[in-house]
Amino acid sequence: MYCIIVTLIALAYIFWDVNYFLRIAFTIGLGRLFQKKCGVNDTTTIYGFCTTQDVDIFLKHMNNARYVRELDFARFHFYDRTGIYENIKAVDGHALQGASSIRYRRTIPIFSAYKVETKLAYWEDKTLFIEQKFITLNDGFVRAVVLSRQNLINVDTETLFRGIPGADQKPECPEEIKHWLQAIEISSARLRKKE
Ligand SMILES: *[C@@H]1O[C@H](CO)[C@@H](O)[C@H](O)[C@H]1NC(C)=O
């Protein structure tokens, strides 16, 4: 019996990124148990720790891909705490990552604790712009800053924000997002031309 369980767990780890699913369940679960609901205009925070699993080939600091993985946990947590997730689910919609831009400012060393702050920076009818920051706890330094564009499928922002406070005042489009949108347009036009 014991043998079968160990084999099943081993197989699960071979075929799936089990830790990814555990981390999502854990992050959302903790949020539901211990954190208040928040508005669309609030900043949410999750915490992380750079372990031996997260480092690059030099074994000294977090590898670049780990940041992107961490964004998912922080974003799901934000969606759950605000209630956006429930509203998406209610109409059978989806939010897909359409683009992201990361600026790595300084590495996150192994065995350091950090937090990821998530905030909705701007939105349009069918897109959300999310800003996330990786901040090390010992010095408060912003190690990386990320902009993401989430494309809404089968749902619009009005439906998304229904019943959630903080959406009454739409923020000004931040300067860097304006320029980033132009960059996306140019890249998109060039690819369309090639195809
Ligand atoms: C978010 O919006 C609500 C309702 O408009 C307001 O009461 C609250 O102060 C805002 N919070 C922040 C952090 O701006």
Image (spheres, rainbow, N blue to C red):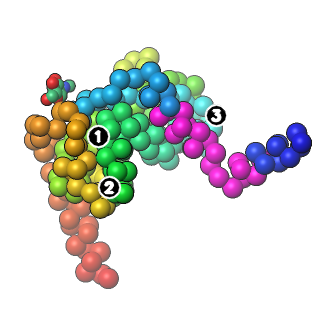
State which tag comes first along the sequence, 2 or 1: 2
Q: Nearer the viewer, mark 2 or mark 1?
A: 2
Q: Which of marks 2 and 3 is in front?
A: 2
Residue 11 inside the magenta-drawn segment = yes
Quickly name the residue at label 3: 52
Disc 2 and disc 1: Cα gap in Å?
A: 25 Å
In the drawing, what numbered circle is on residue 91?
Answer: 2
Residue 77 % position (x, y): 41, 36
In the rendered image, which quarter is residue 78 located in? top left
Task: Please indicate whether residue 28 sits to the left or right of residue 102 in the image.
Answer: right
Q: What residue type is labelled 3?
A: Thr
**For the magenta stretch, what is the residue range?**
10-28
In the drawing, what numbered circle is on residue 131?
Answer: 1
Q: Which of marks 1 and 3 is in front?
A: 1
Q: Is mark 3 on a helix, strand or loop?
A: loop
Task: Please indicate whether residue 189 sits to the left or right of residue 19 in the image.
Answer: left
Does residue 169 appear in the picture of this structure? yes
Q: Nearer the viewer, residue 131 or 152?
A: 152
Residue 161 inside the magenta-drawn segment = no
Task: Please indicate whether residue 101 sits to the left or right of residue 19 in the image.
Answer: left
Q: Nearer the viewer, residue 85 or 176?
A: 85
State which tag comes first along the sequence, 2 or 3: 3
Q: Which amino acid does label 1 sit on?
A: Glu
State which tag comes first along the sequence, 1 or 3: 3
- Residue at 36% x, 44% y is 85
Q: Which of 83 and 78 is in front in this view?
A: 83
